[in-house]
Image: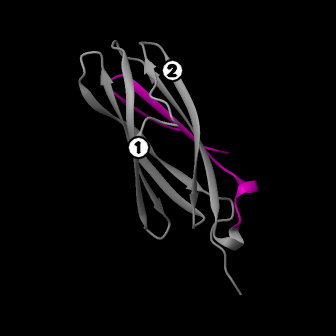
Amino acid sequence: MTSSYQATTRGIRVTVLPQYLTEQSDPDENRYCWAYTISIENEGLETVRLRSRVWKITDETGHVEEVRGPGVVGQTPTLKPGQQFQYTSGCPLPTPSGIMVGSFQMTNEDGELFDVAVPAFSLDSPEGKRVVN
């Protein structure tokens, strides 16, 4: 069973649902792949626009990779109060498990920039730890 993760910042609720992709992974080649679906819901009173993202991806050895970029999946959605935006992206790792955490930089109609937390979420494959003979 897959867990979902949630965080709310300034009325913007971010929900993450990760899913291990068995068909795209190859444990013998140390390649483990996940998809994650993110829902961003504006529960606040102001219209906001997503400008950029920052991810910190940590594999089970402790190696951290930081990814920054404009928008998400090529988009910078604007969300009025009550609106929601959802997208799916992916993450490969060289280890059977890891963790991701991040933030979205948003702007409101007054041009104020603020960060919205993306909750830390686990990337756990069903393979788990293996013993090589």
Q: Which residue is mark 2?
A: 84
Which of these two is toward me, 91 or 13? 91
Residue shown at 34%/12% (left/top)? 45
As shown in the figure, which amino acid type bears the numbered disc 1? Gly
Q: Residue at x 50, y 66 (%)?
A: 60
Write down the residue under mark 1: 69
Secondary element under disc 1, as helix, strand or loop, is strand
Badge 2 amino acid: Gln
Q: State left or right for residue 127 relative to residue 61.
A: right
Query: Foreground residue, 105 or 22?
Result: 105
| Colouring used for the render | one colour
- How far across and down, in percent of the image, does residue 118 sit? 42, 39
From the top left corner, tell me how far across and down residue 42 is, in percent. Answer: 42, 20
Labels 2 & 1 near each other (Cβ < 8 A): no
Magenta stretch: give its range. Answer: 1-26
First reached walking from the N terminus: tag 2 or tag 1: 1
Q: Is residue 32 above or below residue 91?
A: below
Counting from the top left corner in percent of width and height, residue 36 is at: 58, 43
Q: Sort mark 1 into few (<14), some (14-19) or many (20+) by Cα contacts within 10 Å.
A: few
